[in-house]
Amino acid sequence: MKAYFKLTLAQLRLFSRNRQVLFFSLIFPILLMAALGSFLGNGNSVNLNGVVIDQDHSEASKKVVEAFRDQKTLKLDAAPSEQEALEELKRGDEQLVVVVPEGYSEQLQAGGGSPAKLKVYYDEKNMAVSQLGITFVNGVADGISKSIVHYVPAVTVDAEPLQSLGLRYIDFLVPGIVAMMIMSNNLNGVAGQIASWRERGVLRRMQSTTLKARTFIAAQITARLLLNGTQAVIVLLVARLMFKVKVTGSWPLLLLLVILGTLVFMSIGFIIAGLAKTPESAGPIAGLISFPLMFLGNVFFPVKNMPSFLQPFVKSLPITHLSDSLREVMNVGTGFGGLWGNVLLLAAWAVAAFTVASFTFKWE
């Protein structure tokens, strides 16, 4: 036990002395969460900006401008001239330009089956945002038309969420960031460190002592579990302070998932370290595996948004079940009874990866 505690302490000291490890394993996930949360997740998931120009200067055109300014998702400010606004749109400073043309009120009063028209300019190079903006403008124009003719809808929609969770994109993002951190630290970190130690003869010297392999591996696992647990708590505290993200479910279950995720990706890291001939090749191999998993594993985007042919493969990945389970615990408050399938699959991945790692691991 004495050797185990000393090795665990030595590994933790190595982490604390390596500034790059601290930066990429702790600061980077927090910066990533802060950046994505600030741009996409704090409140509304969609925000469009642009300008509205009133060239008619009538009572009717003022109502149009006010209708656009009342919108929360589509924020349109006033602009001095159409030409200047189009230049800003061309530079990418604005996403949409809406013009209430001169003669708008006269067209409105004339009626006769020919509706008054609003001009909308958009950037064709940014079609996704442009189409979304045009949809919002059409909605506002439709609302103005209905108010003019005093339209009373015969059918309305009463949208009601299934579980009344009130989730935002940041609530979806934070569990994914925690899962990504566990995967990256263990898969990339273990692969690079073990390959480096083997090349420098550190493992060979350990093998020549009375130190047993299981003591060495147990100390590695303990040190990384402590690191991952601390990182997860820090990320969750930052998420709580910056974006008011809550952990609805059980903390012990959350910890169990962190432990299982650590065991899975540590074992995969040992496999890569065993297969890589040099530390230089271990990094690219680990990156080749972890980088696609980061985007496929339900971390940033829901699995249902991916191509249908890819979804069965994605659903079998450990990172998918880890991020999905963390999300269920944090966002929904699901207990062990609702997640036993995911826990079982993660445990199966851990056993399978550890078995393969035990055959591929090399002291020299």
Image (cartoon, rainbow, N blue to C red):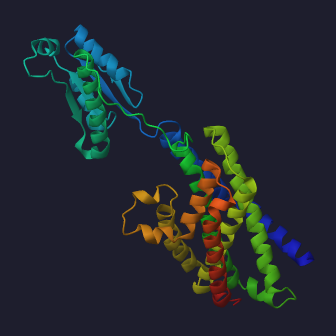
Rendered location of residue 253, percent (x, y): 72, 59
Q: Is residue 364 left or right of residue 78?
A: right
Q: Nearer the viewer, residue 54 or 352?
A: 352
| Quadrant in the picture for the C terminus | bottom right
Q: Is residue 280 above or below residue 91?
A: below
Residue farthest right in this picture:
2
Q: Residue at x 22, y 9 (%)?
A: 58
Query: Is residue 269 visible to us here?
Result: no
Residue at image position (61%, 68%) is 341
Q: Is residue 248 left or right of residue 55?
A: right
As drawn, the residue found furthest toward the top would be 59
Where the N terminus falls, by quadrant?
A: bottom right
Out of 326 and 221, give the one closest to the viewer.
326
> Can see residue 137?
yes
Q: Is residue 53 depicted above or below 353 in this figure?
A: above
Quarter-wise, where is residue 274 in the image?
bottom right
